[in-house]
Image (spheres, rainbow, N blue to C red):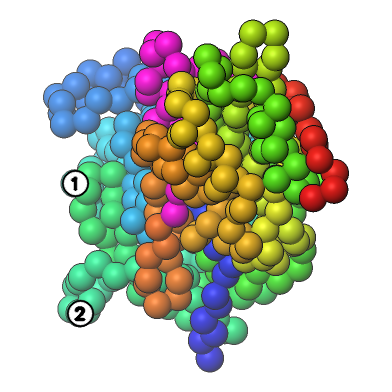
Amino acid sequence: MKTKITIPVIFIMLVSACQKDRQLPAVNSGKTTSTAALTLEEIKTWYHSDTTNTLEWKTARQVVRNKTLYWLVDLAGRPVYNKLKLGYRRVAFFRDTTGAINQHILEIIPDAFYLQQKQNVTEADFTGKIFTFDSSYRLLSGHIYSGGNAIGLIKPLPSNSSGNTLHTNYVQVITTCQWVDDNYIDSEGNVVVYSEKICQNEIIDDGSSGILTGGGGGGSGPGTAAAGSGGGSSSGAGPAPAASNLPGENNPKVNPKNLMICFDNIPDNDAKLTITVYVQEPWPGTTFNIGPNSVGHTAIGLTKSNGNQSITQVVGFYPDASGKDKSHAPSKIVNNGGDLKYNASISYSVSADQFKKITAYISNPPATYDIIAMNCTTFVNNAVQQGGIVLPNASTTAGYDSDGNEYKTMAPSTLGYNIEKLDGKPNVNAKGGTTPNSKGSCDPTI
């Protein structure tokens, strides 16, 4: 029996780029190899006859599995899973049984939740999917891994099968081992329709030695150290991991009117009025939508100065809930002054009228937080729009429900990335820092 699982979107925000200096799992190319020696110089000479792709030769490393030698080299380009750029690819070079040099192309898609918790892709505990292609980019096989163990097998869809159009759905959790058709877009932009063997609560063993040769049903072609859900096979049971805590969410709830009323203590005439948007990225240095800082955070800072008087308030919009309930909950405003480590910021000088419209919005925030419809970035974007400010693009695709419906949202990762692209402009800080201290409450009676 198949069971469709609907996962809270806070847990299925998928990563959208590769981490720099990542640790990559090793690879074995199955039954098509020779034990003959192979040097990197031989590979380069052989490969340079094919100029279709440019390899990152500086990443080349040698791996020996089952007495067979392989060379692994990173290849530019990222696969698209559930319409999101996700994972990375590499080439495995080896000698086939005739002694000739051959290559397999690997599309490696780590599970987003695994990346959030572990922060590095390692052979010992890899969780995700590996697709193996021949040199003509024909799908040969693949494996699904969880915590370093092979739990499923991927194979090409039979040539006589229908279902050759792109569709998006969650991997289905199955009570017994069963083949499920799915698809994704490889790094060349082609739709790959395939079948994958999913098993719940058991590890498939085809008798091969070691997890690197691909337990889970056999098949030739490269496999790697681990595999997992790769996009939603978890039921979401149990509490959220610590890494999913939103930056600053444990700060006490404040009444925003108490903070915004402070600005009335400084005259508008000749005042300097500044709005600053601060972004803490989920995974600094990448464009992942989820990472060590959960889904990241966007805060808004307001400063009013006139002569010797100056007041700054930095606030953020949060769910007033815990655990999985945070994805949709009553909202709260939190003081983000003095403790939010941001990666990028952008500032705008505004008029007194613009400033008042923005503070009025913050004083009366939306009553409900929703990870998709009204999150911290949406709140800040809506606030500055009251003053006619247009932020750099923050829109992204957050995920899909079990019926294939797309979730569009605003995200700190996208906003931070597009602010950093403006580095060099006088109102942009792409080096990051800590938010300035807030003045705090000025009228505890409201």
- Say above or below: 77 vs 430: below
> For the residue labelled by badge 1, is the local secondary structure a helix, a strand or a loop?
loop
Q: CA distance from mark 2 to mark 1?
A: 22 Å
Task: Please name the residue that numbered disc 1 is placed on.
Answer: 136
Question: Of the residues tagged 2 and 1, which is closer to the observer?
Answer: 2
Label 2 Cα crowd, 10 Å radius (few <14 / some 14-19 / many 20+) = few
Mark 2 and mark 1 residues within 8 Å of each other at the beta carbon? no
Report the front residue among 272 and 369.
Answer: 272
* 433 in the magenta segment: yes
Looking at the rendered structure, the kind of residue marked 2 is: Ser
Q: Which of disc 1 and disc 2 is earlier in sequence? A: 1
Q: Nearer the viewer, residue 329 or 24?
A: 329
> Is residue 363 a member of the stretch shown in magenta?
no
Q: Residue at x 22, y 48 (%)?
A: 189
Regarding residue 33, the answer to whether it shows in the image is: no
Q: Amino acid at mark 1?
A: Ser
Q: Which residues are magenta?
A: 409-434
Q: Position of residue 348 (x, y in %)?
A: 45, 24
Identify whether 242 is placed above or below 229.
above
**Is 76 in front, or is 11?**
11
Q: Residue 247: horizontal and vertical position, in percent? A: 70, 41
Q: Is residue 443 above or below residue 341?
A: below
Mark 2 sits on what residue?
Answer: 162
Place of residue 261 in the rendered image (x, y in percent of width and height, measured from the top left): 70, 38
Percent across and percent down for residue 137 are: 23, 48
Left or right side of 252 for 95:
left
